[in-house]
Amino acid sequence: MSIQQQYRSRAKELLQDGSVKMVIGYGEGTTATRRRPIFITNPDDTDRLVLDAACKTNLAGYLLREGLLADQKSVAIFLSPSGVRTINILASESQLSSAQVVVLGFQIQGDTVKALEGTKASDFSPLIAKRKEKRKAQPSHEMTRKLEQMTPAERFAFWEGEFSRCIKCYACRAACPMCWCRRCVVDNNQPQWVNTSSHTLGNLEWNLVRAFHLAGRCVECGNCSEACPVNIPLHLLNRRMTEEVLTAFDHYPGADEHQEPVLASFRKDDPETFIL
Amino acid sequence: MTKILYSDDLTACFSAWRKEGTKVLGPVQQAKTSGFGEVQDAKELDLDLVLTDRTLKELFFPRTEPMLSYSIGKQQIDTSEFLPSEHPCIIFGARPCDAAGMAIDDELFNWDYRDEYWFRRRDRSVIMTIACKESDDFCMCTSLGLAPDSAKGSDILLRPLTSGKGWQVEELTPKGSKALLPIASLLKEGTEEAAPTAEVPVLFDLEACTTWLANPENFESHFWKEISERCIGCGTCTYLCPTCHCFDIQDEGDTYEGIRRKNWDSCSFQLFTMHTSGHNPRNTQSARWRQRIMHKFNYFSDKFSVHSCTGCGRCTRECPVDMGVRETLQAISTLPK
């Protein structure tokens, strides 16, 4: 049985026996190479589910839809390992209860997709632990290194150039499962903390504020860069932040649901070397 | 005999226009994203693009622009207005759907109030559109009653020659004819044939859609929730739409000194309709998506007798979750009226 068929059957069973009220997965898109998020509640519709290497979007953010989990019922969702990490972070930040999430785990490897064992987010902890070690060993990406070697002025010019295209559509925020604030700081207008205009200052303010808010929380799923209609390489900022918290705090976001958020926790033995 | 403009003469045309003090803009690649930018040489243009990522509207309605500055003193209040310059410019190589969008928005910006910011830029610009030889999976101009060689909104229409070496030149407006004067010597009379235009399939029955939308009973239909379930509420579709025109006015500065700016805004955002009281008349994403569709194909059409969509397809092409006008109207055209 193909992995797609296997997951369709699994989704059907889950809906039929009432263990979940909804399956969030991927369906066919406008073109042959596109996939789109779909929400299945009827077991007969599970054959609309698609699972292949084109299923790249991290769907976890949909779990935070207002009221979706309020009835304590469970929802099944197709998740890659970064999606599972997202669930862990959202649980640790009290945004959902992982007990209500049935994971249909998969992993994309090149052009193929592999099934992952497990149904609860915690089932994937050993896999995530392995990925952490792999991430630590992974050399910095070429572009991250290039940015690192720039002088502050060059780096500023690089980002100023990239952000100059920003149109403040906030697709990065909307696509990011970590951007769950009911009211984003940029939408606060009394006072207006961040300029709403998409001029140089406003764009720098927005993109840097977002990058800082994601430090130690980003799972590098790629939703932001993928969503950006003007192709700003937002992942470069987040990747840099990830490496920073990994080196400084040995923190790999979303390792498990009991992990304390790195920037919202305090340790007495923290050397606080950054305080002047 | 038709007037022909050969690609080889394009840079000479640009020089001739620039000598007259006219800026030349066209479709260019700007760091991984295509849009309209100023060019000196024809080599800088990317005329093979089916459509630029960013729309023509940005040239007339920038995403942010200063309107006035204010300074409040003890004795007096000083303001000074920032109006766009009237520096003439030629936009070479727009697409028919984008150009049509500008004509559609002319109605809006000159309805109860004439928007000087829009019209100063419109009046100073000449749009030279190139008919489309190719389309992609998202193009849907024909579904909106337009075509790959629609003249709407253009001052000059260029039809690519079969040989690929230039264009047949069709003057559409007096402004367009005037723009051709400095390059008159570079235009040749010829009989070369124009290449066939792109074949863009009709994807939905627009009339069936508008009839359905006009029925008040459908306003509360469950359809809206289903079709927009995956909408994440970003502003991509509206900001990359050639006709979406909503804006917000923001004062940047403090009580005494600052700049008032006009910024793009989007009906996709929750904040767009949020009242000071906390009440939001469009409190769900489905209500916001319905608004976008109703505005384009019902309210706008009622007021100005034209739909606020040209079928450029960018909403679907760029949507992070693969939604768009196309899917919605395709679905509506199959619903019982």
Image (spheres, helix red, strand yellow):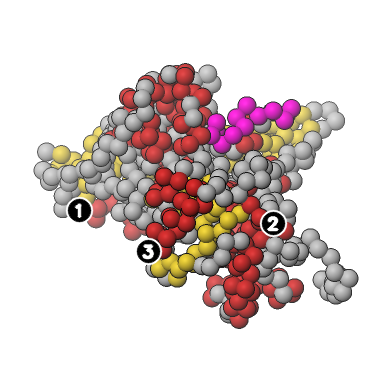
Which residue was labeled with disc 2? A91
Q: Nearer the viewer, mark 3 or mark 1?
A: 3
Q: Is residue A216 visible?
A: yes
Residue A120, position as x, y percentages in the image: 61, 61
Alpha carbon distance from label 3 to label 1:
48 Å
Question: Which residue range is magenta in the image?
Answer: B275-289
Residue A219, position as x, y percentages in the image: 61, 64
Q: Secondary structure at mark 3?
A: loop
Q: Nearer the viewer, residue B54 or A228?
A: A228
Q: Residue furthest right?
A: A268
Give, as a three-letter code, the residue at label 2: Ala
Q: Is residue B320 above or below residue A123?
A: above
Q: Which quadrant would the N terminus of chain A be assigned to in this image?
A: bottom left
Q: Which mark is residue A2?
A: 3
Give, as a three-letter code, the residue at label 1: Gly
Callout 2 crowding tier (Cα within 10 Å): few <14, some 14–19, many ≥20: many
The chain letter under disc 1 is B
Which residue was labeled with disc 1? B164
Q: Residue at x 53, y 34 (%)?
A: B286
The chain letter under disc 2 is A
Q: Nearer the viewer, mark 2 or mark 1?
A: 2
Discs 2 and 3 share one subunit: yes
Q: Which quadrant would the C terminus of chain A be assigned to in this image?
A: bottom right
Q: Is residue A222 visible?
A: no
Discs 3 and 1 share one subunit: no
The chain letter under disc 3 is A
Give, as a three-letter code, the residue at label 3: Ser
B282 falls in the magenta region: yes
